[in-house]
Every structure is written in structure tokens, then in C-alpha cells.
Amino acid sequence: MLSETVELRGHIIDSLILPKVLDEILTRGANFKIAQVKIGQKRTDQSFARIEVSAESSEALDDLILRLRQHGAEVAEKGDAQLAPAPSDGIFPADFYVTTNQQTFVRIGGREFEVRAPMLDSAIMFDRQQEIARTVRFADVRKGMEIVVGHKGVRVAPRQRATSRRDIFQFLNANISAERPKGALIREIAREFEATRKAKGKILIVAGAAVVHTGAAEYLERMIEGGYVDLIISGNAFAVYDIESALFGTALGMNLEQDARADAGHENHMRAINLVRAAGGISNAVKNGTLTRGIMRACVKHKVEFLLTGSVRDDGPLPEVITDAVAAQRAMREKIEGVTLALLMGTMLHSVAAANLLPASVKTLVVDINPAAVAKLTDDQTFQALGLVTDIEPFLRELTECLSQLRGVAKTSRT
Amino acid sequence: MRELLLCPPDYYGIEYEINPWMSRARGAETELAQSQWQGLHQTLASLDNKIELVPPQPKLPDMVFTANAGLAVGKKFIPSNFRHQERAGEAPYFARWMEERGYEILRLPENLYFEGEGDALFVGDTLFCGYKFRSDIQSHRAVAEMLGCLVISVELVDPRFYHLDTCFCPLPDGGAAWFPGAFDEYGQRAIRAHVQELIDVEEEEAKCFSCNAVVLERDIVLPEGAPNLVKTLTNRGYRCHQLPMSEFLKAGGACKCLTMFLPQRESVKF
């Protein structure tokens, strides 16, 4: 049972705010104990109540407190967060605080610190020397590290859904099924990309091999050339098929132009891997002139960072692929810092991994032909997620078309 | 003679969407809005009121809704802290205008949202304040301290009736016309406990913003579309002046939203 003390002030008796708050606590399956009540004597005197609220789980308590705050309840206890040392490498102290991806603050020594890099399912460590609080995952916790335990002194500021239509992410927070028209929405998405580019935000693309299979690589390439991509996170297959397609015109043996299996096409991706390995990596293959087309080449040419993480089914892999899953997760976490707009498409594995690391404030767009993948990624990850169930190729084709139109308009209006 | 503050609709239009009534796809007709506003202005002037006009400002289309400028009691004025950025720009113009006319400006802490007379209406010496969609309940406590009056805070639960003055209309005989469905159960009970002779407005008529009425002793200026309410009010001895307000309804406002009392109340008795 977790508890928190809240205070109510004002004309809470005449307005029936006190009974409302108490009823709300009970209706939500929580309990209360009235610690103190002072009722105003005169008509205009304000009243005061201090109430201890307890709930089964921290989530239930957070939700309830958020609701009570709407009715003017203020959290009374301004105590410090409790810290306990990690007992050994890779192990958190018992009762460690498990984070959400919302903006979070911890109170230590009477001061409030914003927790850096908010992400799901981490603990919070406090560095006394540098006076910073940040999330830490199992792989990075070291013996003796000070870790926040319990709920006291931790404050979560969940993002509110906006009622104003400032942008599509705030307004929709929804999934758009395959049956819905998407033209207008994609135009809005394009505007969001353009605005982020202009504002020098950081755009993350998490892409699956489907981008290449569906023949959408050229659109992603154009986005890279247009400055709409700052970071690509993907796996070995994505890069392999892109390179195979650049070198042989096939993706896993399928001729992309003619939609037919090429002769001995199944060999192509193996030969592509071998060429890149021989060159010493993708960047070298671009520099030595082996690789002259494709998404990976565009990344190298336009200095767009890419991060390739491996899996057990990979062929090769390409030299740049990080095959240690823990090291890969760590690298993703480092690179993802500062991302303001994320497009996750055509990969469940890498999208879930990235979404787990994204703060709730990042505008996140999920595109997949599989409705279950979209639902998984938008349902519980973040408030600002917008999901589209659609094939990748028509989506990217239309998005790049809208982006070039926007740029066209911008150019005309400047001249 | 009452003094009323209006703002000409020179820059009025639906330029953003901050309540369920607003849709940029369904804009207001400029000429019709002008003539409807003129109609309101003339009606209020003809009822022996002094009309003051605050100069409208470009890019602040909702400045026409002066009820949200703040709350004036005696010579004190509490300027609004608008919840939406789209309207925040109005606040300094209203505050300056009031200050220039000798009002003492009492500012609420910046982090407390409060949307003025739109969410704060007196019934006798009791101030009823709406909260949740626009004003924070915490602002009510601050207002109560500034004015030294009893404040009854009521939660608004229907987003169509996002300000108190869209669903609650105090009458000078101590009663009020209201749409109960706009309030939660506790708000309804609090209002019933403090206001005698309530007139329930049916939903169809409430949707025409019939509670958004300017009450001037025996005269009530309200939007057309509420024949039953008009009949009830007439039977109680009020003269009803029904005005077309279609173009302002598109922004979620009508007669009362377009009018602020200078002041709403001369003084508050403890």
C-alpha cells in the first residue's frame, strides 16, 4: 500500500469539494484517513483539510492524485526521495523506483532534480558529485550507485492531452486504420517534418527491411537528401537489402523493378555482404566507390548517423552491426537523446526497442501494415503517438511528395 | 445605469480551435457577425446602459468576448490568465485599459488559470466559479482571498459548456437559469443548496447558449432559440430581448460572452 498526503483549502465545504474528493478516493478503490480538518467559522472563512490517501499501486496512486489535483488538492509531503546503494553490478536495490517515460522529478536535499533521459522501465540514479539524476538500466548499474527507492520525493508530470489543435500528434493521439483516407493526415505529417527540420530538431527514423522490399528506399533516400533525417536505427537486414538493391537491383533475390525473382538472386545478398565486409564496412564501401546508390550510401554522403543492431537470424553481419544486445541498447540510448520527432516503420523489433527509450514528449509516428504492431506501439508507449496502418511504400511516396511540395511553396514564397 | 464593456468584432473570426464549437472549416461570416454585434450593442445601449469599447487588436479574434477579460468588483479588477496561448495575448490590452480607467489591478499568480467573468458570476454576495476546462480551482481560492467573499467552486463536465456563463445565468431576484447537465453531481448539489428558484433550461435551448444572457434588472438580452426559457422568464416579469447570434455561436460565445460588467458588483458584503 502506497500513500501520499494531500491538502485542500478554500470554500471546500460549501462547494462540496471535500465530500467530492473523499468520494473520488473511495470510488477509485483507494482509502483515506482525515488527518486534520479546520472549518471556517464565518461565511467567507476558508476551510482546510489534510487527508492521507493510500492506494494499492503507485500507478493507481499517481492517477488518483492527478485527478484530485484537478479539484485543488495539493500534495503536502515535500519529503526527500530515499536513496539506497546498488548491492552489486547489474542489480538494483530492493523496492527501486521503476520509471515511466514521462517527465519525472526527484527531490534530494530539499532540491528538485529533473530526471534526465526519461524512459520506460528504468531506475533512477543520483550522482552526488555532478548533482544529476538520470535513468539507469540494468546493464549500466554499478555496485554502490545511489538508486531511488520507494515513491516518496518522486514527482511525475504526465503530459496532458491538449484540447487545442496545435498539431496532429496532440490532437489525435490515435490510430488510423487501413480503411481511413490518409491524404490530409500525411500532409500534416509532412508539415511536422518540415517544421522540425527548420527548427533544427532531431529526427529519428527507425526502419525495417520492408522499406526496401516494398520499393520505398528511393523515398527514404530523398528524405535524407532533403535534410529530414538525423538518425537511422535499424538492423542488419535493412542495410543488407538496401546494399543488395544498390549493387544488384534485387532485395533478397527479388528484382524490385520487375517484381520477379532474379536468376540466382538468392546469392545476391550474400555477395553484397561479402563486398562490404571486404571493404571494411559500409562507410569504406562508399568511399572506395563500391557503393554508389541507396539509403546507406545517402547516410554516409549526407553524414546522417546510422545505428545497426543485430539479431540471431542475421546473415553476415555487416561490420557496422552491433551484435551485443546490451551494447546495442546502450548505443541506442546515447544516440536517441535529443530526438524530437520519431518515425517508426515496418519493424516491430527495432520500433519497440526505440519506443522504450523515447521520452513521452517526443512526437512519435508509427507506420506499419500490421495493425497489431501499430496498436502495440501506440497504446501504452506515449501520449504523443500517432499510428497509421498502411503499406510503407505508398506512405513514404506521398510523404516525400508532400515534402517536396512544401519546399516548392517555401521557395516560391521567398522569391 | 450599468456600465458595460464591449469590443468591436473588427478582427473576429475562427482562426483556431479551442472548444468543441470552433471549426476552422466553418468560419464566421464577417458582415453578418458585424451586424449581429451591432444589434447587441444597440439593444444594450437602448436599455439605458453606458457602453464602453475596448479597441480590438489584430490577431486576437476572440478579444470580442470581453467577459473573459477578467473580473471587476468595485474598483478592483482581476485580469484573466488564459489557459490557451491563443488568447493569452488579450490579457495585457484589457488590463491596461482597465488600469487607465482607474481600476486597481489585482494579479493572480501566473500559474493559475482564470478566465474572468466567463467563469465567475455573482448570485447575491456569493461568487460562483466554474473550473476544469478553463479556470483552475486553485484560482478560485485566490479570488476569494482578494475579494473577501464566499466562492462556490463548481466543476464543469460538458466540454460544450466550457465556461460557467455558458450554462449558468444568475437573476436579480436571487434565482438563476441553468443547464444542470453541464455540472457534475456535486456542483449541481452546491448550486441547488445556494440558489433559490432555479430555472432548468432544457438541452436543446441550452445548446443555443440561452444561458449566455446579459441580465440588466428586468431586461434580459439573450440569443434567440429558447422559446420555453423566454416564456418562463416572461412569466416571472422579465422582458426578454432575443438576438440572432449565429456567427458568435460558431466560436462558442453569445451575448454574455460579448459583454463584461464594469463592475459586475459594486461591493461584497461579508
Image: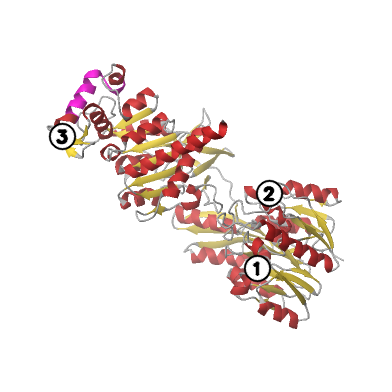
- From this view, report whether residue A373 is shown above or below residue B180: above
Q: Image point 62% across, 73% down: which residue?
A: B180
Contact check, label 3 and label 2, Cβ < 8 Å: no
Q: Which residue is mark 1?
A: B209
The answer to which image quadrant residue A228 occupies is top left
Mark 3 or 2: in front is 3
Instruction: Check disc 3 and report its element: helix, strand or loop.
Output: loop
The answer to whether residue A88 is seen in the rendering is: no
Examine the residues drawn in magenta and state their main secondary structure.
helix
Residue type of the residue flagged with mark 1: Phe
Q: Quadrant of the C terminus of chain A?
A: top right
Q: Nearer the viewer, residue B244 or A375?
A: B244
Badge 3 and badge 1 both on one subunit: no
Q: Which residues are magenta?
A: A269-283
Q: Which residue is mark 3?
A: A262
Q: Image point 38% across, 39% down: which residue?
A: A92
Residue type of the residue flagged with mark 3: Ala
Q: Image point 44% across, 30% down: which residue?
A: A227
Q: Residue furthest top?
A: A288
Q: Quadrant of the N terminus of chain A?
A: bottom left
Q: Position of residue A401 (x, y in %)?
A: 41, 39
Instruction: Check disc 2 and report its element: helix, strand or loop.
Output: loop
CA distance for labels 3 and 1:
69 Å
CA distance for labels 2 and 1:
23 Å
Label 3 marks which chain's residue?
A
The answer to which image quadrant residue B253 occupies is bottom right
- Badge number at residue B60: 2
